[in-house]
Image (spheres, rainbow, N blue to C red):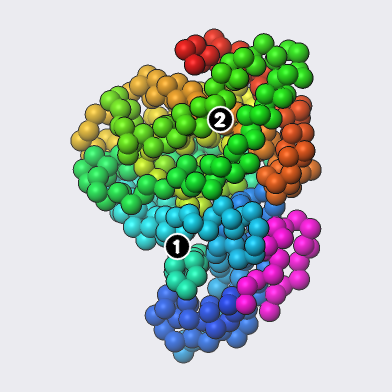
Amino acid sequence: MTEEVDTSQFNADELQPPIWLNAQFIEEALSAYEKVPLQVTDLKISPATAQGDHYASVMFRTVAEYTTAQGKFSKPMIVKTMPEEEGHKKDILTDSHIFETEILMYSKALPEFERILQEAGDNTKLYVPCIYHSLEPRKVMIFDDLVPQGYTVIRNRPATKEELKKVFSKLAKWHAVSMKVINERPDFLKDFKYGMWDMSAFLSDPMITTGLPCFLEMLDKVPELTRYKPYFEKIKENYIQRMSEIMLEYRSNPQANRYYVLCHGDFHIRNMLFKNNKETGAPDDVMLVDFQFSNVCPITIDLTYSVYMLMESEERCDLGKDFINYYFSVLVDTLKKVGFKGEVPTQSGLWNHIRGHRYYDFFLMTSFLAMILAIKTNSLKLTDLILDHETKQKTYFLDAYLKDVKTLLPIFEKMGYFENL
């Protein structure tokens, strides 16, 4: 049965589950996972996420009541599948590798990373148990639902500094282990080569192509910022190509004195679930989810992305210095623990790498930052931001966005980002 819910807060394509998502399907998946015959006696299905949480999939929250020879049980789960409704989401995702990538993350990469950490005496959990996955006859994944275990997505408040330190600590450990694997067994991660920028439909989508034109229009209308317009006019014809070069650097043109890791690929606040101590409120854990764009690429991809998509204005306008330096300390400590045999990164080397990818900053500031700040206002729908140009253009005049841009552009200028474009 489908659970009654308030439909206004959810994505339209998650209000009605597909026909195949029924008791028989869940029964077969759970039987294989539990390795015992079982019978599903009741199945409740509801949307799994709120508007703005994600876009590259369709997700449902399910609770299965079932019986086995040992008695009665209840299992809360998240079912993730590809869009089946015709429309923009299906158009840009149909030919992508996102499910193949995420299945490999859960079945191959993350279990091996956890094993390496455990051998080094670190019991950090990197992923949610995956109960079931398939590519045929349809692309589906089923996970344990972490919400009943006390995990929540942060939506209506900023993450605290303590919560973000948990995030960067976990990312640093994951990155460190991936550096060890790349150094010792580069073929192990050879299939992780499909990030956002390997999706041709994504690159040509208005979500990407209209960002800089909207930004230029804003510069033209805000006198305080108009003097920066020539810089962005100069890059408008080739910045997508320059972005592609950064994203594909490891596979096509690896550079000396650069750091490459298996990146998350979409490292923002809605792809994290936090668990806080019930008595003190202090963060006990964070679980990263949604690995559909994970790929081996420059370390900057997750770190710079986090500045614009995860941090608040205060940290962003310092380019995330304190959090990234904290991340670096955990990265180096973990590399030592796991016996990394390559050249250990330096803090100055990390910052040189980040600053060497200025076009990534340009892209995130001109295309994604306005969108994420608009979502945080809870006044605009993600689908409207993506599909309606007029709605998107308005986001470039939001007070929060203008405040950040007015701070960031002088910083970029001081750092030499506008030289030799």
- Residue, disc 2: 363
- In the picture, the disc for residue 414 is none
Q: Is mark 2 on a helix, strand or loop?
A: helix
Residue 174: horizontal and vertical position, in percent? 38, 44
Asked if residue 7 is among those painted magenta in the image, a careful observer would answer: yes
**Residue at the bottom extreme of this rendering:** 69
Foreground pick, 26 / 382: 382
- From the viewer's perspective, tell me whether residue 303 is left or right of residue 363: left
- From the viewer's perspective, tell me whether residue 105 is left or right of residue 185: right
Which residue does the image show at 76% across and 66% down from the upper left? 5
Which residue does the image show at 65% across and 16% down from the upper left? 229
Residue 180: quadrant of the picture: top left
Q: What stretch is highlighted in magenta?
A: 1-19
Above/below status of 274 relative to 133: above
Which residue does the image show at 22% across and 46% down from the upper left? 185
Residue 1: horizontal and vertical position, in percent? 68, 79
Foreground pick, 166 / 100: 100
- Residue, disc 1: 129
Residue type, numbered disc 1? Pro
Above/below status of 324 relative to 92: above
